Image (spheres, rainbow, N blue to C red):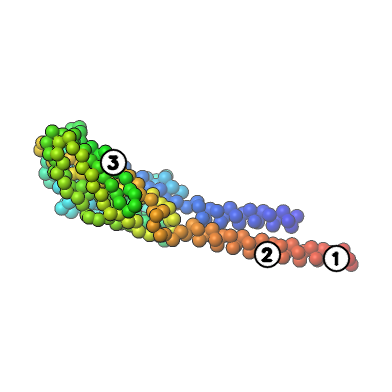
Amino acid sequence: MAVRIFAAIMLLSIIALAYTSFGATVSLTGLCTYSSVSSNTVNVSFSLQNSGDFPATGVSLIPKGLGPLASANISAYSIGSIYPNATRGATFNLSNLPMPGSYILEVIVSYFQGSSNFFAAFPCRFNYDSGNLTDYLAPISAGYSDGKLNIGLFNIGSKPINTTINIIAPPQVRYSPPNRTATIDPQSDYNTSFNVSVGKLSGLANASLGVSMVAGYVYDGKYYSTLENLYLSSSSSTTTSISSSLLIVGAFVAVFVILIGLIIFSVMRKRKRSRQGQ
C-alpha cells in the first residue's frame, strides 16, 4: 500500500513540474478593420486575441504611422489583461490623410506573461478613398540569414518608382539602417538588406518573432504601401531559458522526492521486520 501511495505522489509531482515548465503560454493574434468617417479621416480598429492558455497582463498598444502618417500624433492605449480565448482592442482616429491610397499603421504591443515583459509588432494596413489597389512594387524575396534581412522588389509599372523601405519589428529586434530609399526603374528589380540582431528574450530559448517590410511610394497621385511579413528566430542569439532551468530544478526535486521515498520505505520495512521478530 505504501509503495502505491508513493507512486501516486511521484506521478502528481511530475505532472505539476511538467505543467510549470511547458504549460503556460500567451499567443496573441492581431486583426485590423477600418472605416472612413469623414473627408480625410479614417477610424482604424485593432484587436488582439489570446489563443494561449495563460493571461497577458498590462497590455498596451503603441501606434506609429509610416510614410505620410509619420508625423501623426496617435495616442497609446492601455487595455489591461487579455485572458485565454478573449479579445480586446482599441480604435485609432487618423485624420488629414494627404491623398487616396493604402497606408500602414505600425502597432507595438507590450504585455506581461507572469513577471516577464514581452513585445510584439503588427502592421495594420488600411485603404482610404482608393478602391481596390494593385501594388506596382512586387516583393520577390524576403529572408533572414547570417544577421541580415534580405529584401527584393520588382517594379511592374511603366514609370520609375521612388520608394522608402521601412521595417516593422518589436523592440528586441535591432536593425540598421533605420530605412532604405531607392529609385527602381520600370520592369526592374532592386535588392537590399538590413543588418539585424535579436536581443535576449527572458524566458524563451527559441521564439519566432514577426517582422514586416513596408515599401511606401506615390504612383499616379495615390500612395501605396507594399507589405511583406516574415519571421525571425531567436535561437541564434544567446538567451536565458527559464524552461531549461525549471527542467533542471525539476530533475533535482524529483531525485530528492525519490530519495525521501526510499528512506521512508526502508524505515517502514525495518519497523515491520522488527515487529515480526517480536
Residue 145, x across and y down, in percent? 34, 49
Mark 2–mark 1 distance (CA, rounded to whole Å): 23 Å
Packing grade of label 1 (10 A; few <14, some 14-19, many >=20) is few
Q: Is residue 88 left or right of residue 75?
A: right
The residue depicted at 50 percent of the width and 58 percent of the height is: 244
The residue where tag 1 is placed is 275
Give me the disc on residue 141: 3
Observer able to see residue 117: no
The residue depicted at 49 percent of the width and 57 percent of the height is: 243
Q: Quadrant of the C terminus?
A: bottom right
Whichever of labels 3 and 1 marks the residue nearer the N terminus, that label is 3
Q: Nearer the viewer, mark 3 or mark 1?
A: 3
**Is residue 244 shown above or below 154?**
below
* Callout 3 secondary element: strand
Mark 3–mark 2 distance (CA, rounded to whole Å): 59 Å
The residue depicted at 55 percent of the width and 53 percent of the height is: 18
Q: Is residue 101 left or right of residue 46?
A: left
Whichever of labels 3 and 2 marks the residue nearer the N terminus, that label is 3
User: Given the image, on which type of amino acid does mark 1 rest?
Assistant: Arg
Q: Is residue 141 left or right of residue 275?
A: left
**Is residue 212 shown above or below 269?**
above
| Closer to the camera in the image, 159 or 32 | 159
The residue depicted at 40 percent of the width and 48 percent of the height is: 27
Give me the disc on residue 190: none
Q: Nearer the viewer, mark 3 or mark 2?
A: 3
* Callout 1 secondary element: helix
The residue where tag 2 is placed is 260
Mark 3–mark 1 distance (CA, rounded to whole Å): 80 Å
